[in-house]
Amino acid sequence: MGMMTIRSIPDEVHNALKARAKQNHRSAEAEVRAILEEITRPESRLKMGDALADLGRKIGLTNEDVAVFEKVRDKTPAEPMRFE
């Protein structure tokens, strides 16, 4: 896991973080982690799998359509890249 040090936090911000942490029964450090996760990974974010499934439903793609692709798909493993 990554580590981060934040310097020069204004006193009022630091005090507000400590108060919020106390309300949530967490340390100030745990509160900052929770805030960062909430902001960077919102529940409303677009998830690729959900978007692709929605697209498939909109165009009427069925399991039978996907089965056709499986029959003709090249299943040969890809060659790894060489950096010589």
Image: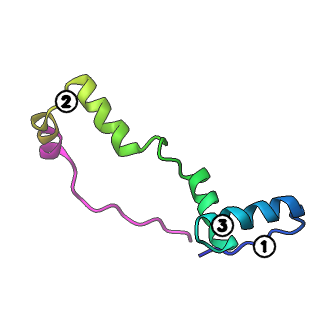
Principal secondary structure, stretch drawn in magenta: loop
**Disc 2 target residue:** 61
Say whether marks 2 and 3 touch (CB < 8 Å).
no
Which residue is at a point 12% across and 38% down the rendered structure image? 63
Residue neighbourhood size for the residue with mark 2, other residues' Cα within 10 Å, grouped as few (<14), some (14–19), many (≥20): few
**SS state under label 2:** loop
Q: Nearer the viewer, mark 3 or mark 1?
A: 3
Comparing 62 with 16, the one in front is: 16
Mark 1–mark 2 distance (CA, rounded to whole Å): 49 Å
Label 3, on which residue? 21
Vertical arrangement, residue 43 with respect to residue 21, above or below: above
Q: Which residue is mark 1?
A: 5
Q: Is residue 72 left or right of residue 25?
A: left
Q: Choose the circle earlier in sequence order: 3 or 1.
A: 1
Q: Nearer the viewer's eye, disc 2 or disc 3?
A: 3
Q: Nearer the viewer, residue 7 or 1?
A: 7
- What percent of the width, then of the height, locates residue 76? 24, 59
Mark toward the start of the polypeptide (1 vs 2) = 1
N-term mark: 2 or 3:
3
Q: Is residue 16 above or below residue 1?
A: above
Tell me the element at label 1. loop
At label 1, which amino acid type do we have?
Answer: Thr
The amino acid sitting under disc 3 is Ala
Crowd class of label 3 (few under 14; some 14 to 19; many from 20; radius 10 Å): some
Alpha carbon separation for disc pair 3 and 1:
18 Å
The residue that appears at 62% across and 71% down in the rendered structure is: 30
Mark 2: which amino acid? Leu
How far across and how far down the image is residue 79, in percent? 37, 64
Residue that appears at 59% across and 62% down: 34
Residue 37 appears left or right of 70: right
Judge left or right: residue 7 versus residue 70: right
Range shown magenta = 68-84
